[in-house]
Image (cartoon, rainbow, N blue to C red):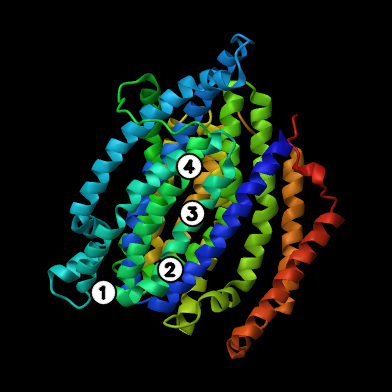
Amino acid sequence: MSKKLIKSGLIVSAMTLVSRILGLVRDVAIANVMGTGLMADVFLFANKIPNFFRRLFAEGAFAQAFVPVLSEYKVKDEQQGDHQDTNLDEKSGEKNNQEQTRLLIAQVSGTLGVIITGVTLFGMLASPLFVMLFGFGWFIDWFNDAPGGERFDLASNLLTITFPYLWFISLTALSGAILNTMGRFAVAAFTPVLLNVAIIGMAIYGAPYTQSPAHALAWGVFLGGLIQFLFQIPFLYQAGMLVKPKWAWHSAGVKKIRKLLLPALFGVSVTQINLLLDTLIASFLVTGSISWLYFANRLLEFPLGLFAIGIATVVLPSLARLHSKNNPTEFSATLDWGIRVISFFGWPALAGLMVLAQPIIMVLLMRGEFSQNDVVQVSLALFAYLSGLLSFMFIKILAPGYYARQNTKTPVKIGIKAMVANMAFNLMLAPFFGYVGLAIATSLSATLNAWLLYRGLKAQGVYQLSTKTLTFIGKLVLSASVMALVVYQLSSDFDTWLAMDFFEQVQQLTLCIVAGAASYLVMIILLGIRLSDFKVIKE
């Protein structure tokens, strides 16, 4: 089992790496053409709203509810196939083995398609309402004809362009979840690359032909969604899962997904709701606050997406299958494996970003409209987010422990507690620390969320950290600490970094990263960590 998980995890992580690198290039393009001023704040706002709903209708809550049910149907089809007449030829046997699975996909795609079409049309028509709700500070300026009120009109216009992305990405996420359940992880992991390519292309070539760089980027989001949707269709056909959608609100499979989905809509999206609350509060803060939080969050998303989301993507279908087969021992062992793997990558990522935050921001973003002051402001937000990096990662692994067992109520209760805590932290910290306080609050609430998820799994007898894993994590923390000291000694101070030209910065940064990675690997070898530690340990 562990070899298969590792292979799948490496495939997803490799594809995700390509996507994240292009994502950084995309952010470089955004920073270059717009910096962190009014135009950047408005575009990032208009991009955030459909992405929030994407978490609800696409790979977030929907996937957590859909994948376990799809896995259950797939297992049933396989079990029925085992009892079929052995004289059936391979082609007809395969078709019969997929009959119920294909029916479920048809029903879900049709039902989701109708709902998401309605939501998308409403979002486009009611874009000013969404801007008023989540950018209330801008609405007040617009209503009172105060300086900066033009942000409200511009955000409403851009949101009308970006909202259809929700329709494309929801159906793209549905097809990706199907392919992942079939064990074809590479396609879904590669798909986000196309969005980045579209946005980069519009930033470079589309700006001269649109009203503003922000409009060009908004159309890049629209085109990226369309291209992603079209890209996966041939692979669905190849897998035999391209079916005719049908409305089936009252079918057994859709009812089961609905039952799991309704609470999961809130539970899985707690982090996104917290980020939207941050955006709401940031709309009252100085211009640039939304952009500083965005770029800091994007840098945080690189290790989070590359490691935690990559591992979680392959863990959920595996856990759902083990639950369907009533195998609690291997279920717990798989969760433990996921914690060990993300810890192996998460601790050095945390240490490295803490020490090299400002040099990395300089190399990636400081050009065009992105200033030296922006480097400092983004780094402060990044430090705050990094305090919760491991918590964000653990949530990605622990939450599937509930959803794979079709338990969505417990994560919802935990999510409510975390969101209330985040709001309290925001109110306590934002008056003193501004936008940085919002980032600290997000990290604190994520830590609470992760702890409550783990405590719940432990109380239910589903999963408890093994002694070997706790020892393993302790060795990783020590190794990452040594790595941080090595990198700190090799790195220069802020003014020295500023005095370097771009190529000198790249050379120095590369040296620090290579030396840090080498010291981390040497330490883990000296402390006795071996490849056998990455096997699924059944106790």
- For label 4, count other residues whose C-alpha is less than 10 Å away and answer few (under 14), some (14-19) or many (20+): few
In this picture, residue 287 sits left or right of residue 195: left
Between circles 1 and 2, the one closer to the viewer is 2
Residue 477 spot, x, y in % from top left: 72, 56
Task: Evaluate if marks 3 and 2 touch, with contact meaning CB atoms under 8 Å apart.
Answer: no
Residue type at numbered disc 1: Gln
Between disc 3 and disc 2, the foreground one is 2
Depth check: give the residue in front, 38 or 381.
38
Furthest residue in direction bottom, as rendered: 499
Q: Nearer the viewer, residue 511 or 486?
A: 511
The answer to which image quadrant residue 107 occupies is: top left
Query: Which quadrant, please, contains the N terminus?
Result: top right
Residue at left offset 36%, top offset 24%: 255
What is the x, y in percent for residue 428?
39, 61
Precedes in sequence: disc 2 or disc 4: 2
Q: Find numbered disc 2 in the image and state the secondary structure of the residue it sits on.
A: helix
Residue 482 higher or lower than 55, as above or below: below
Which is more toward the observer, 59 or 130? 59
Between the C-alphas of marks 1 and 4, the distance is 35 Å
Q: Which residue is mark 2?
A: 201
Q: Which residue is mark 3?
A: 192
> In what element is the residue under mark 4?
helix
- The residue to which callout 4 is attached is 234
Residue type (three-letter) at the residue carrying disc 2: Gly
Q: Which residue is mark 1?
A: 211
Q: Is residue 461 visible?
A: no
Instruction: Tell whether label 4 touches label 1 (CB within 8 Å).
Output: no
Mark 1–mark 3 Cα distance, whole angstroms, equals: 26 Å
Mark 3 residue element: helix
